[in-house]
Image (cartoon, rainbow, N blue to C red):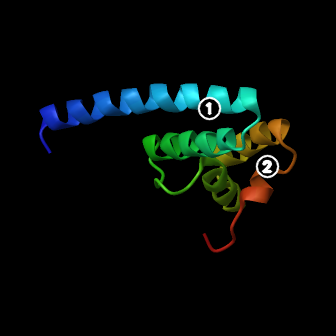
Amino acid sequence: MSRLTLLALWLLCQLAHAVASLWMLISIIVGSPRALQIAIGYDQVANAATGGTVDQTISRRAARGAREGMPQWCMLCKLLDLVALDHCKNNDVPGD
């Protein structure tokens, strides 16, 4: 894929981010469950950007890494547990 095409895709992604961010804020204000779905989408994007797969969240990746004893993922799970108790454990899928 050419650099020009990738640049065009990047610009479209920036527009999508602005729309998603605004939509998420509105969803939070009106109490819509869509806000969580948008947050999960951002989570998947962050996972893909850091070398994970597109259809997996960082939480699931961290849970798998912690299960395998990888220190960086164990540390992330501890941080995520501060936000939601047993966050990684609740996002772990054995055999994943």
Question: Is 30 rendered above or below residue 68?
Answer: above
Taking the image as shown, residue 6 lies to the left or right of residue 13, namely left
Query: Total marks drawn?
Result: 2
Whether label 2 touches label 1, CB < 8 Å? no
Q: Secondary structure at mark 2?
A: helix
Question: Is 29 rendered above or below residue 70?
Answer: above
User: Which amino acid type corresponds to the residue marked 1 in the rendered image?
Assistant: Met
Q: Foreground mark, 2 or 1?
A: 1
Which of the labelled discs sits on residue 87, or is there none?
A: 2
User: Residue 60 is drawn in which quadrant?
Assistant: bottom right
User: Residue 36 is drawn in which quadrant?
Assistant: top right
Taking the image as shown, residue 68 lies to the left or right of residue 16, namely right
Q: Quadrant of the C terminus?
A: bottom right
Which of the labelled discs sits on residue 24, or is there none?
A: 1
Which of the labelled discs sits on residue 85, or is there none?
A: none
Residue at point 83% right, 42% down? 84
Label 2 Cα neighbours within 10 Å, binned few <14 / some 14-19 / many ≥20? some
Q: Residue furthest front?
A: 30
Taking the image as shown, residue 13 lies to the left or right of residue 29, namely left
Q: Point out the tag, 2 or 1, that comes first from the N-terminus.
A: 1
User: Which amino acid type corresponds to the residue marked 2 in the rendered image?
Assistant: His
Residue 78 image point, x, y percent: 79, 41
Residue at point 69% right, 71% down? 94
Question: Is 9 rendered above or below residue 89?
Answer: above
